[in-house]
Amino acid sequence: MKKLLLAIALITFYQTSFSQQYGLFGTKTMFDAFENPSQKSFVLDSSRKFSSNFFLPYFGINSANVGGSETVVRRLINERINDTRDLPLGTGEINHFYENSNMYVLTLRIFQSYKYQKEMGFAWQIRSNAHINYTNETLAVFDSYRRFPQNQTLKGIFDTDGYQQSYHQFSFTYRENYNKRLAFGIKASILSGIVYNDLDISDSYLRIDADNNLLDIGLAGTYSANFNDQNKINKKTFIPTFKNPGVSLGFSTNYTTKKGLFLMANVKDLGFIWWRSNTHRTVVNAVETIDLSQGQSYANKKIRDIFELSEQPDKFTALTNAKADVYLSKTYGFYKPAIAVSKNLFYRGGDVAFVNTFNYNNLSGSVIPLYNLNNIFMVGLQGKYQTPNFELFMGTDNLISTASTAKGLIKRDATIGTGANGASFYMGLGIKFGNTVNHPQFSDVMPGINDNEGGSFFRNLFSIFRKK
């Protein structure tokens, strides 16, 4: 339990996290094409045939913590001190921590055919998702048990649930135009699990016997993970071995109306991972009596032992954090407003973003007010330089919190910043190379101009359903 809760601070500080980066939707960048596979990323008569990030940075950082523990977590991040003296207890308040990550390690995208504007892509990504709901008391018990009232039975104060899942994703994407206005795309992936842990404490109580200097703690719930004190996380853990295999699928479509309204819909990363290497599941319904004269460290160890001493080897499956996205935009000269709505399908959370993009030649800037369904309001800022053969972007989904977090972290001062804990930063660089993909009337050689073999994949697919 302590490992999962400390992840609240550690992930915020260390984790390469990833938001949806809505400012990049509808931009025809590599990111846009891989995340929304119906999108094209090549420009006829200008772009070259291949594009890649060549292991250059293509990543983002975004995580947040909301609730009464905000000051405690800020101190834990900036000063590495777990001090809960100012944390209110007995209020029943629930804190929420969330994180979604995705880092493109290597990408390759290929312009395949002029006819139907076919493109295919290959990518190696590392993803991570986490969501933890925890009480103030769960943090306080690992700081000092003396903060709790004595000779009283406190029920439900440690009821906590949360999960964290990290994995490699090796994906293939394919897109084509169905006609001049409608396009479809798919993304198929094989997965290799890295780290998984899931905690659900459904019932709990605590009583401190001041007369005998004893603490009684009762916990009932489950804990599943693929690591423990015997199988610790190390560098080898992050090598893709497919000992914890999985698959996922994504589907995308977009349509442009005669008046220039662009609509896009997505179901992304619909899949699962079979966790079967070094995995264990713990089911507990136990009461532990702890001698408080042994000190806080001894008490912490006895609390951890409630779960760790009951571990049993077990294999299990876990769903990936699939999302459904809808995006609408329209360009008015140099200004392009857009609305993006995203909802997690299996886990809590989602976003509603209003993207305001201002374009000048190859440069653009975006201001992005965003409401996260975990009750977090953010304002993002993005800058982008893009030509048909080069792209460079940089931004943040949470400008104010990122600035205060960075300042507090540099000065190691927990008094800097207020409100929800959060940090966000993303950037990417992509390059196109090879022959230019000219329109056939300007070139003697054009990939797919005589595309008589196979034709349109989606036309053939839909014709099968029409025949049935």
Image (cartoon, rainbow, N blue to C red):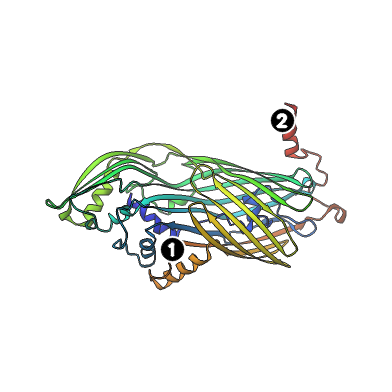
Of all residues shown, which one is farthest toward the bottom?
Answer: 411
- Residue 70 location, quadrant: bottom left
Total number of numbered discs in the rendering = 2
Q: What residue is pinned by disc 1? A: 419
The amino acid marked with disc number 1 is: Gly
Instruction: Residue 255: give x, y in percent of width and height.
Output: 73, 47
Query: Which numbered marker is on residue 465?
Result: 2
- Residue 419 location, quadrant: bottom left
Asked whether the viewer can see residue 70, the reply is: yes
Of all residues shown, which one is farthest toward the right?
Answer: 441
Q: Is residue 394 above or below residue 139?
A: below
Instruction: Residue 230: give x, y in percent of width and height.
Output: 32, 47
Q: Could you tell me how far apart the alpha carbons at marks 1 and 2 are, in whole angstroms? A: 53 Å
Residue at image position (37%, 58%) is 68
**Structural crowding at the residue carrying mark 1, measured as other residues with C-alpha within 10 Å and reported as few (<14), some (14–19) or many (≥20):** some
Asked whether the viewer can see residue 53, the reply is: no
* Along the viewing direction, whichever of 394 and 454 lies nearer the viewer: 394
